[in-house]
């Protein structure tokens, strides 16, 4: 379960560190490093939850995690999610909190669960972890788009950007490609 309240403490043992420093990287070393990264994500998620408070995106993420724990773990471990969390927590006034909806959408699609929200667009773009960048032409710098998932499919729409985008082929399970 997503337990952002109790992230684990990960320490890299001296022997493991020595093997890694010498250029070794066997599966045990990699697993230990991945566990450390996962723990770091849980710490960041906990800090995010404290800063933003629980809401529909957090609830959707928890539901998706119960239905598809491996998929949600992979989404949370996506490099873009870690970068976004760290950036948002350093600059909370930067409106990065809305990106949690994009994470929750991808997780909900992976779990086959419905979810609908609005996501902030930055210059007409929103990043969907593990899927890619969705882009709209002619948007205001701080526009929002409607995003939803049904039966594992994701669609985005923003009628005010001069075009409506409907992406029924985007699926998390198929690893669909996003873009224009």
Image: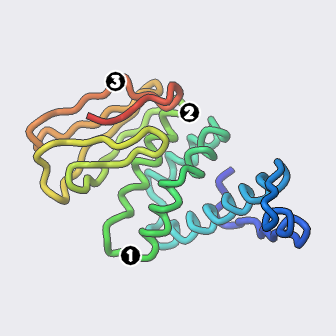
Which of the marked residues, 1 or 2, is nearer the chain's N terminus? 1
Q: Residues within 10 Å of mark 2 (few under 14, many from 20)?
A: many
**Of residues 172 and 148, the one drawn nearer to the viewer in this rendering:** 172
Which residue lies under the disc numbered 2?
111
Q: Residue at x 91, y 68 (%)?
A: 15
- Across and down, in percent, residue 30 comes to 77, 53
Which residue lies under the disc numbered 1?
91
Which of the marked residues, 1 or 3, is nearer the chain's N terminus? 1
> Disc 1 to disc 2, how far (Cα)?
31 Å
- Across and down, in percent, residue 86 comes to 49, 68
For label 1, the SS is: loop
**Of residues 47 and 17, the one drawn nearer to the viewer in this rendering:** 17
For the C terminus, the image quarter is top left
Question: Residue 23 is drawn in which quadrant?
Answer: bottom right
Q: Residue at x 57, y 67 (%)?
A: 44
For label 2, the SS is: helix
């Amino acid at each position: 379960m997503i337990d952002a309240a109790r992230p684990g403490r990960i320490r890299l043992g001296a022997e493991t560190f020595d093997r890694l420093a010498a250029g070794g990287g066997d599966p045990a070393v990699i697993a230990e490093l991945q566990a450390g990264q996962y723990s770091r994500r849980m710490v960041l998620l906990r800090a995010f939850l404290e800063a933003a408070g629980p809401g529909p995106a957090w609830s959707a993420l928890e539901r998706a995690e119960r239905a598809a724990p491996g998929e949600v773990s992979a989404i949370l471990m996506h490099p873009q999610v870690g970068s976004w969390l760290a950036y948002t927590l350093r600059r909370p006034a930067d409106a990065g909190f809305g990106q949690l909806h994009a994470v929750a959408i991808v997780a909900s699609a992976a779990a086959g669960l419905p979810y609908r929200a609005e996501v902030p667009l930055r210059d007409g773009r929103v990043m969907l972890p593990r899927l890619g960048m969705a882009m709209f032409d002619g948007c205001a710098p701080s526009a929002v788009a409607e995003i939803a998932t049904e039966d594992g499919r994701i669609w985005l729409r923003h009628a005010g950007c001069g075009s409506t985008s409907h992406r029924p082929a985007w699926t998390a399970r198929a690893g669909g490609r996003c873009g224009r």
